[in-house]
Amino acid sequence: MPTRDDCLELDRLDGLAPRRDDFVLAPDLIYLDGNSLGPLTRATRERVLATLDEEWATGLIRSWNAAGWMAAPTRVGDRLAPLIGARAGEVVVADTLTLLLAKVILGALDLRRDRSVVLTDAANFHSDLYVAEAMARRAGRPVTLRAIERDTLDDELSEDVALVMLTHVDFRTGEMLDLAGVTERVHAAGALMLWDFAHSTGAVPLDVTAANVDFAAGCTYKYLNAGPGAPGFLYVRESWQGLIENPLPGWLGHARPFDFERGYVAAPGVQAFVTSSPSVIALSALDGALDAFAGVSMDDVREKSLALTDLFIELVEARLPGAFTLVTPRDHARRGSQVALRHEDAYGIIQALIARGVIGDFRAPDVCRFGFTPLYLRFVDVYDAVTHLVEVLEGAEHRDPAYATRNPVT
């Protein structure tokens, strides 16, 4: 079993270790919840302050032109694109993940009007399920949403399936799906593929171009560290641009928005999926947060991610044998950048850890969820987090009556 000194040595050899200085983190805090909300980066703070103090306070309305505010959705999208293996002009940052999914679902259904089924994962994030069901009802024709067990996808694919929508990394368990393999099988059945990258982008290498992905969407407040409520991003493969329509057209998706024409004419490219005015301050936060990935290889991020999660699993099982059930896959090819442990007192355990300065989160009904962000997390943090976990269980701290009532956000 690795010792604390072993972990300190791993940190000394870690090529990503200097990136921790890019983040605003209390020295005594162990943050294992970047898969839910990433921490503030120093560049984000500077970029937002510049937007407030220079572009808005001084430039005022002139900054729509002088500071390039109007072009921010596609400009920042181009900065994000390499993290998912997309090309310039294929990613736009706007709206929220759920709203972007809604746009693509309806648009994709119009591309496959001879088909009447949308497939998704029964264990998908609930917002994805809600919006998929709602869009199926609003398709203008009878469309059935079929929530299936992900392992039965091949059996469910048929000539009736118009669209398959799956989340690449499961929000609860951390299981990662085969991006290229699933996409290929969906295409072989004549259907379109929509991926949710909420728990993938910035955490694992992605290559939508090589995988021939049709559409993808994700959020930016998790591993991309853009801040609470940060806008989502949408990927539309270049070959679909001009064919798929935005079902919620707005003036800034118009080809000539300041001509104020009565009729709608879609802008070329992915700009057509912009509906409303860009959220400039939020886009500035993301623009600054992306600086943390400059010069970083996602292969190096992935290598460290697997080393961190391997270490955590090994230490938990060695020091707390039988206390938890591991629900995250051990197989590297099927693991995202988080570890989920099942325990009947999971909520209390997470709250007791938070009280000690170890931040994870709880997912109903019984999952302790821990995210591992390689850009700022140290190997010694993993060792110390497990030590706290041992002490919580040994001292029965998780049974404190204060944890009997759940907080609104878990």
Image (cartoon, rainbow, N blue to C red):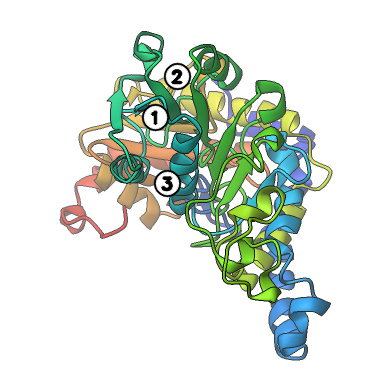
Does 331 sit left or right of 353 as displayed?
right
Tell me what residue is drawn at x 51 percent, y 33 percent: 111
The residue carrying mark 1 is 173
Tell me what residue is drawn at x 32 percent, y 50 percent: 352
Q: Do the residues labelled 2 and 3 touch (CB within 8 Å)?
A: no
Does 324 sit left or right of 108 as displayed?
left
Tell me what residue is drawn at x 78 percent, y 44 percent: 88
The residue carrying mark 2 is 329
Image vertical order of residue 394 relative to residue 98, above or below = above
Q: What residue type is labelled 3?
A: Gly
State the separation of the CA atoms marked 2 and 3: 19 Å
Q: Which mark is residue 360?
A: 3
Image vertical order of residue 256 relative to residue 139, above or below = below
Disc 3 element: loop
Q: Do the residues labelled 3 and 1 touch (CB within 8 Å)?
A: no
Q: Is residue 9 visible?
A: no
Q: How crowded is mark 3: few (under 14 residues within 10 Å), some or many (20 or more)?
A: many
State the separation of the CA atoms marked 1 and 2: 8 Å
Disc 2 element: loop
